[in-house]
Amino acid sequence: MLWSLLFITLIGRSTQQDPVTSSGCSPGWETIKLDDKVAFQSSVYTDQHGVYYTADRALDGNKETCSNTVEQRPISWWTVDLLGLYEISCISIYNRFQDNVDLEGAHILIGNSSERNAADTTECATISTTTREENKTFNCENGPKWGRYVTVYKNTSGLVILCEVTMKGTKKEPFKLIKENKTWADALYHCREEHMDLVSILDNKTQVWVELEAQKADTPFVWLGLHYSCTLDLWFWADDHCVGFDQWADKTRTADCSISGAMNTSGNHLWYKKSVYDKYNFICAV
Ligand SMILES: *[C@@H]1O[C@H](CO)[C@@H](O)[C@H](O)[C@H]1NC(C)=O
Ligand SMILES: *[C@@H]1O[C@H](CO)[C@@H](O)[C@H](O)[C@H]1NC(C)=O
Ligand SMILES: *[C@@H]1O[C@H](CO)[C@@H](O)[C@H](O)[C@H]1NC(C)=O
Ligand SMILES: *[C@@H]1O[C@H](CO)[C@@H](O)[C@H](O)[C@H]1NC(C)=O
Ligand SMILES: *[C@@H]1O[C@H](CO)[C@@H](O)[C@H](O)[C@H]1NC(C)=O
Ligand SMILES: *[C@@H]1O[C@H](CO)[C@@H](O)[C@H](O)[C@H]1NC(C)=O
């Protein structure tokens, strides 16, 4: 047991002339910008100087500052919310030399919800080394994975310490915010010319993705493909779908002519009836 541990340690050392080495990601993937993303973790270590080792320290581009959970048997985790859907190819973890850095056996999970055990969370890779004093790249097993959240999940005892996390992938957004102020009809025209259509929101999952885009708008509302026919007294989506799932702020469906539906850019992102002549940013399905 002791001998095999020593052996692993020696092998680990001998392949590392440069402490910052990496086996590398498959070529052709872009580095995902992480310093504007949101990270959180199971608990936060505080040192004797009152410094909080928060989750964002693993994304700040500074490899001297680390995130650090406290001992919380048996589970510790760190998660980044990429605030959009990405196809993720690989994740690199850099850790400095520190005795309590030991991620061996931890799992890298990718999912569409922050829940680690959810059906829409899948494993990218199992961490095969401590990551102590190395920059180790993990390619997702069986190919790139799609998701919004990336988690380092240690369900054997020990801490999750991360000095710097980087990842490569491609943004796979089914929707695009257009930061131009247009009337509903001009917005529809723009989406149909340049992309597919103004967005339709047929379920809660789509609502959540569209909310993420809407938050980046510079108008208080964004146009959706939601239109009202006063002759039929009927709401419908620009792509002809009926309105089933809804998020109306005001549940009365009847409206005036020349009314379309827009999402509040902030708050609960409810839908409001707005004059088609108002000019807002808008979201296209791409
Ligand atoms: C996340 O959602 C996307 C788009 O709906 C889907 O393609 C992907 O498989 C999902 N990821 C997981 C881990 O379920
Ligand atoms: C670790 O390796 C990856 C992939 O080569 C690189 O993008 C990243 O900048 C490296 N991280 C550090 C802290 O050197
Ligand atoms: C730890 O988590 C991984 C990934 O979710 C899972 O496959 C494994 O069964 C878990 N192990 C334990 C001991 O709970
Ligand atoms: C929609 O999904 C979000 C995030 O998963 C959840 O917080 C919310 O309660 C859901 N809303 C509805 C109406 O199902
Ligand atoms: C759109 O309108 C908002 C105010 O509603 C303004 O802040 C923004 O600069 C306008 N954008 C363009 C591209 O004109
Ligand atoms: C949109 O949401 C914000 C934040 O919750 C709220 O203050 C504002 O009143 C909402 N807009 C409308 C028209 O209700």
Image (cartoon, rainbow, N blue to C red):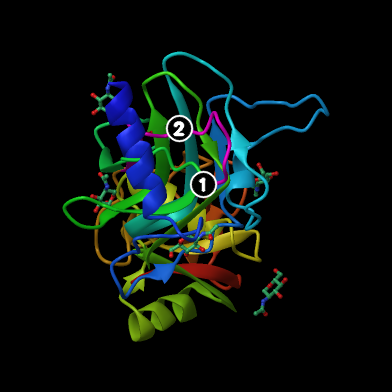
Query: Counting other residues with Cα less than 10 Å from the Cα at mark 2, is it few (<14), some (14-19), or many (20 or more)?
Result: some
Q: In this view, does 66 lie to the left or right of 224?
A: right
Give the residue at the far right of this rendering: 49
Counting from the top left corner in percent of width and height, residue 238 is at 32, 67
Quarter that holds the C terminus: bottom left
Residue drawn at the location 24% of the way across and 33% of the way down: 119
Residue drawn at the location 61% of the way across and 38% of the way down: 67
Indicate the quadrant of ligand 5 in the picture: bottom right
Counting from the top left corner in percent of width and height, residue 143 is at 20, 57
Q: Examine the image and state in which quarter residue 236 appears.
A: bottom left
At label 2, which amino acid type do we have?
Asp
The residue closer to the viewer here, 40 or 131, is: 131
Quarter that holds the N terminus: top left
Residue drawn at the location 38% of the way across and 38% of the way down: 9
Query: Which SS type dominates the magenta stretch?
Result: loop
The residue closer to the viewer here, 4 or 267, is: 4
Cα distance in 3D space between marks 1 and 2: 10 Å
Query: Counting other residues with Cα less than 10 Å from the Cα at mark 1, is it few (<14), some (14-19), or many (20 or more)?
Result: some
Ligand 3 within 8 Å of the CB at mark 2: no
Q: Residue 11: in sight, yes or no? A: yes
Residue 138 lies, with reference to residue 52, above or below; the image says below
Residue 130 lies, with reference to residue 144, above or below; the image says above
Number of marks in the rendered image: 2
- Queried whether the magenta region covers residue 183, the answer comes back as no
Residue under numbered circle 2: 102
Question: Which residues are drawn in magenta?
Answer: 94-110
Helix, strand or loop at mark 2 = loop
At label 1, which amino acid type do we have?
Glu
Q: In this view, does 21 lie to the left or right of 275?
A: left
Give the residue at the far top of this rendering: 73
- Queried whether the magenta region covers residue 100, the answer comes back as yes
Residue under numbered circle 1: 133
